[in-house]
Amino acid sequence: MTRQQLVAQIFQKKSYLCVGLDTDITKIPKHLQSHPDAVFEFNKQIIDATKDYCVSYKINTAFYEALGVKGWEAMERTTNYIPDTHFKIADAKRGDIGNTSTQYAKAFFETMNFDAITVAPYMGADSIQPFLEYKDKWTILLGLTSNKGSADFELQRVIQQSKVGVESAELALDVASHKTEFLYERVLRKASEWGTPDNLMFVVGATQADEFTNIRTITPNYFYLVPGVGAQGGSLKEISEKAMISECGLLVNASRAIIYASEKEDFAQEAAAIAQQYQVEMQQYIKQ
Ligand SMILES: O=c1ccn([C@@H]2O[C@H](COP(=O)(O)O)[C@@H](O)[C@H]2O)c(=O)[nH]1
């Protein structure tokens, strides 16, 4: 899917909601647990109920990989069931040496028909390049994540990149005069040199609202995949006010808050009701 097609969907639906299909077999309603194809059946009903309120679905592959072959089959069937109008994200957080990343890209973009995959930046340019080579596919790079552990590396200060490689005495001076940046800022700046706003997005957690204005300044035209509203408590209002651009530039994900809205037979109806609430709130923020 191209950026133009994604933006058109957002404006048509007045929604930038991404429904997360983090389908945990132990959390789906009891009456479905004995179904021979329980995960797919659950997903199918969630998709049917929510597709009018969202523009994207995110499959977190961990929930499917945990089930072995049956899980992979359910993931493939789910991906094929999602309408082509909707942006299909594999939240797989991959990235490895080049020839291995090439196989990951093939798995998710060719063998399975995802529009996008999440990747970790830690191994650098050659681990990301194979994903970026696919036309009309998207690489979604972890920028500033929603979890507490983001403080361990992403929010650590490093010497600004323009200063790396200069005399050590000068470096010492720079540290003293605070010419530093967060590691996540370095990641955003560097990765923006590898991809473009037409094939690269960044993951930015909704729980990191204090950083959103700064992030938008560093990456003015990029789309962000924003997990962390709903179960993790991030504010849709705050992130939308701080990071919305004329082409929206946001895909906001909610998983548990939508798919586990009810444990009973009415789970799909309740999921639709929550998805609709997000869509109604989102339409106020879209600048069109
Ligand atoms: O920084 C990140 C990156 C990815 N995620 C993923 O998003 C969803 C969030 O699920 P909720 O149930 O809406 O909390 C899940 O798949 C995470 O693995 C994230 O939360 N934060």
Image: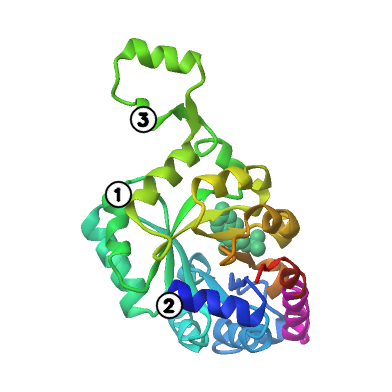
Q: Residue 125: give its label.
A: 1
Q: Which residue is mark 3?
A: 162
Secondary element at tag 3: helix
Q: Amino acid at mark 1?
A: Ala
Closer mark to the observer between disc 2 and disc 3:
3
State the image quarter where residue 58 is shown: bottom right
- Could you tell me residue 185's position as x and y percent? 48, 40
Q: Residue furthest top?
A: 169
Indicate the quadrant containing the C terminus: top left, top right, bottom left or bottom right. bottom right
* Residue drawn at 48 percent across, 86 percent down: 84
Q: Closest to the observer: 115 or 266?
A: 115
Give the answer, above or below, for where 158 lies relative to 137. Answer: above
How much space separates mark 1 and mark 2, taking CA atoms? 23 Å
Closer mark to the observer between disc 1 and disc 3:
3
Secondary element at tag 2: loop
State the image quarter where residue 265 is shown: bottom right
- Could you tell me residue 32's position as x and y percent? 66, 86
- Could you tell me residue 177's position as x and y percent? 50, 16
Left or right: where 274 falls relative to 96: right
Residue range highlighted in magenta: 261-279
* Residue drawn at 67 percent across, 77 percent down: 14
Q: Which residue is mark 2?
A: 1
Q: Amino acid at mark 3?
A: Ser
- Is tag 2's residue or tag 3's residue first in the polypeptide sequence? 2
